[in-house]
């Protein structure tokens, strides 16, 4: 009896063991094979520096925003120094602080009613702007101070860049003055700043600051007064000389101020008011916003071949806007390569480490992308015999020639990216000798890429072989249209483009593009589009498989999953960031992932489970 019971127990254990092995085997067998793109396969071989410093993408958006520049410039140009402003700041206390500033500065800082009115106006209307400007200053001021120290220029002139450009290297005035120091084209050329179709060094913080420092030194040798140097920077040395003559030969700014152009009369007081707010921000409750990246946390690398910002962003897993911020002198979002000249790329130090450690792989990938720019046309040729003659003729015409009329704000880089072609090809097709293109000109473009749909609907319809597959594609298209409606928002009191962009996880530039806005001004009650329908994409890995096997079209094209219907979990891998994860899901933003998973500071760890549209 005992032997019988032991036999039964042994048989049960043996059965359970076999069942567990079968389950494990089943799990192994049904695990789907995950195919990765060529880009991911390249990045998987990268050597990475795990001590990388983290970059706050929201702060990068702040750095590239132009709303402070627009507001502050308008304020300085229209402010009335004779209007008394009601703001809590005793006149006697202000006099004491200005005297303290005067004692440690080469500038002649003295109290007057006009200066008091400007300071109080800034305190009343621009507190938030100065809080943001102080965050930007942590990146730019060390650059300015280093350049000024070399030329023995007063370090306080760093505040002039706040007045000139609101610390935005991409700022452009109505007159065409460009960059942090607002150089006109002729002045930039005079101080050896390179300006061509690809590069505008007036937007380069280092080179433009060196030129500004040289200008200040020359003007001081002429006038011997730093206030007059600032006045000449604003209105030109000729106007300052005229004002000196009209005043009877007086040589101090405050003595000739009434003889200067109206804008220059408020220019120096605005500079002194800016200096005061930076010096006494704590006393007025102005708390600088957090600046994650400092200038000393970045470095440069010499680029040995032409490459686009998009290629760099994809390879290094960083926002393209961040590369634009750190390299503002490249006009077309392309780092060019000229024979015999050096071009440098500035990146955060951790990205520099990744770039240098994998330089050969990066250049190989860029070369690979250049070779495969016309991949859709090659695929169409492979299946051309299966397509009806009429449809084939239509596709060939579309591939051979498209016409595009140049619109306001266009450049060759943006047009080439829109049609998935090279800039050099665009220039060759249209006999262009430079990258400049006239507004309204019609360009010839040889591409089968549909810039309006930005997807592969037309290619799918022309390459479909069977009626059944055509019906399935049409059904999927209708489903996507229902699931990816554009989102709108009605402007409420107190809203501006910056607050709306932050609320919906987008950027001011994207909002302006979606709504065809030419400025940052929006009317109360206006309905604006804050997001657009999600386009479908081609899976690169599937395309590669199709080329190798020469199989049917359905084996290498698929629709992108609508983010509304994802509803899946993602397990964080080593080296992941919220930005790289969001790129895996078209239409999903960093803000979406944070909201779905209650993430506040952006920190994620390997193994962590994230809900996608949870």
Image: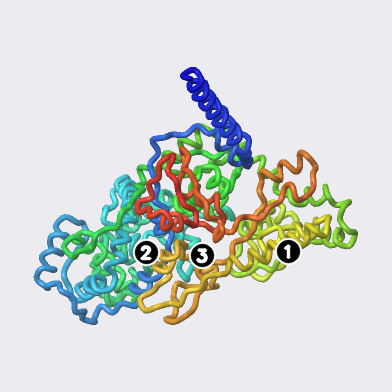
Packing grade of label 3 (10 A; few <14, some 14-19, many >=20) is some
Nearer the observer: mark 3 or 1; the answer is: 1
Give the side of residue 319 with respect to residue 89, left or right: right
Measuring 35% from the left and 76% from the top, which residue is drawn there?
494
Measuring 72% from the left and 47% from the top, which residue is drawn there?
556
Q: Which residue is mark 2?
A: 164
Measuring 55% from the left and 55% from the top, which residue is drawn there?
566
Quadrant position of residue 268: bottom left
| Residue situated in front as seen by the camera: 69 or 235 | 69
Q: Which numbered disc flags the more N-terminal residue, 1 or 2?
A: 2
Packing grade of label 2 (10 A; few <14, some 14-19, many >=20) is many
Q: Which numbered disc flags the more N-terminal residue, 3 or 2?
A: 2
Q: Which numbered disc flags the more N-terminal residue, 3 or 1?
A: 1
Q: Position of residue 395 (x, y in %)?
A: 82, 59
Q: Position of residue 130 (x, y in %)?
A: 29, 64
| Residue situated in front as seen by the camera: 49 or 30 | 30
Quadrant position of residue 418: bottom right
Name the image colouring: rainbow
Q: Position of residue 294 (x, y in %)?
A: 34, 47
Question: Is residue 575 something that shows in the picture?
Answer: yes
Spatial CA distance of label 3 from label 2 is 25 Å
Packing grade of label 1 (10 A; few <14, some 14-19, many >=20) is some
Q: Which residue is mark 3?
A: 510
Name the residue furthest front.
Answer: 1
| Residue situated in front as seen by the camera: 345 or 216 | 345
Q: Is residue 24 above or below residue 477?
A: above
Secondary structure beneath dot 2 equals helix
Q: Which residue is mark 1?
A: 474
Secondary structure beneath dot 1 equals helix
């Amino acid at each position: 009896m005992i032997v019988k019971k032991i036999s039964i127990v042994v048989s049960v254990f043996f059965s359970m063991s076999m069942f567990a092995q079968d389950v494990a085997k089943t799990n192994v067998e049904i695990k789907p094979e995950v195919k990765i793109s060529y880009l991911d396969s390249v990045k998987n071989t990268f050597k990475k520096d795990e001590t990388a410093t983290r970059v706050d993408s929201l702060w990068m958006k702040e750095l590239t925003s132009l709303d402070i520049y627009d507001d502050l410039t308008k304020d300085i140009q229209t402010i009335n120094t004779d209007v008394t402003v009601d703001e809590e700041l005793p006149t006697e206390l202000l006099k004491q602080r200005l005297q303290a500033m005067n004692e440690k500065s080469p500038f002649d800082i003295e109290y007057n009613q006009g200066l008091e009115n400007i300071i109080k106006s800034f305190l009343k209307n621009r507190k938030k702007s100065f809080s943001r400007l102080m965050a930007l200053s942590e990146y730019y001021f060390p650059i300015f101070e280093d350049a000024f120290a070399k030329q023995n220029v007063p370090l306080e002139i760093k505040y002039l860049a706040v007045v000139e450009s609101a610390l935005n290297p991409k700022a452009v005035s109505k007159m065409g003055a460009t960059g942090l120091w607002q150089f006109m084209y002729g002045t930039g050329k005079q101080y050896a700043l390179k300006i061509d179709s690809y590069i505008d060094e007036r937007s380069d913080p280092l080179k433009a600051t060196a030129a500004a420092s040289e200008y200040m030194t020359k003007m001081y040798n002429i006038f011997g007064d730093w206030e007059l140097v600032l006045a000449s920077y604003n209105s030109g040395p000729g106007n300052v000389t005229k004002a000196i003559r009209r005043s009877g030969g007086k040589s101090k700014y405050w003595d000739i101020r009434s003889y200067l152009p109206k804008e220059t009369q408020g220019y120096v007081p605005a500079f002194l008011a800016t200096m005061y707010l930076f010096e006494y921000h704590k006393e007025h409750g102005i708390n600088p916003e957090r600046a994650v990246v400092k200038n000393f946390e970045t470095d440069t690398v010499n680029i040995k071949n032409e490459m686009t910002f998009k290629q760099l962003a994809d390879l290094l897993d960083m926002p393209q806007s961040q590369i634009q911020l750190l390299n503002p002198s490249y006009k077309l979002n392309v780092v060019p390569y000229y024979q015999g000249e050096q071009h440098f790329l500035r990146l955060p130090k951790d990205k520099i480490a990744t770039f240098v450690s994998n330089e050969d792989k990066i250049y190989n990938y860029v070369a690979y992308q250049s070779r495969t720019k016309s991949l859709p046309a090659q695929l169409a040729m492979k299946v051309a015999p299966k397509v009806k003659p009429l449809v084939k003729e239509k596709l060939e015409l579309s591939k051979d020639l498209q016409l595009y009329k140049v619109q306001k704000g266009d450049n060759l880089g943006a047009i080439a990216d829109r049609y998935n072609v090279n800039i050099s090809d665009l220039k060759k097709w249209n006999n262009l000798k430079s990258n400049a293109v006239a507004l309204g000109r019609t360009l010839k473009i040889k591409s089968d890429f549909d810039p309006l749909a930005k997807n592969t609907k037309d290619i799918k319809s022309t390459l479909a072989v069977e009626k059944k597959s055509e019906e399935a594609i049409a059904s999927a298209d209708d489903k996507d249209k229902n699931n990816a409606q554009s989102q709108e928002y009605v402007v409420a009191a107190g809203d501006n483009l910056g607050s709306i962009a932050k609320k919906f996880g987008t950027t001011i530039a994207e909002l302006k593009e979606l709504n065809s806005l030419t400025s940052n001004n929006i009317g109360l009650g206006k309905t604006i589009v804050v997001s657009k329908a999600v386009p479908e994409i081609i899976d690169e890995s599937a395309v590669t498989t199709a080329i190798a096997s020469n199989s049917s079209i359905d084996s290498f094209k698929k629709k992108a999953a609508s983010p509304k219907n994802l509803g899946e979990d993602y397990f964080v891998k080593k080296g992941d960031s919220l930005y790289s994860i969001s790129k895996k899901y078209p239409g999903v933003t960093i803000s979406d992932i944070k909201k779905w998973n209650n993430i506040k500071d952006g920190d994620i760890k390997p193994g962590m489970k994230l809900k996608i549209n949870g």
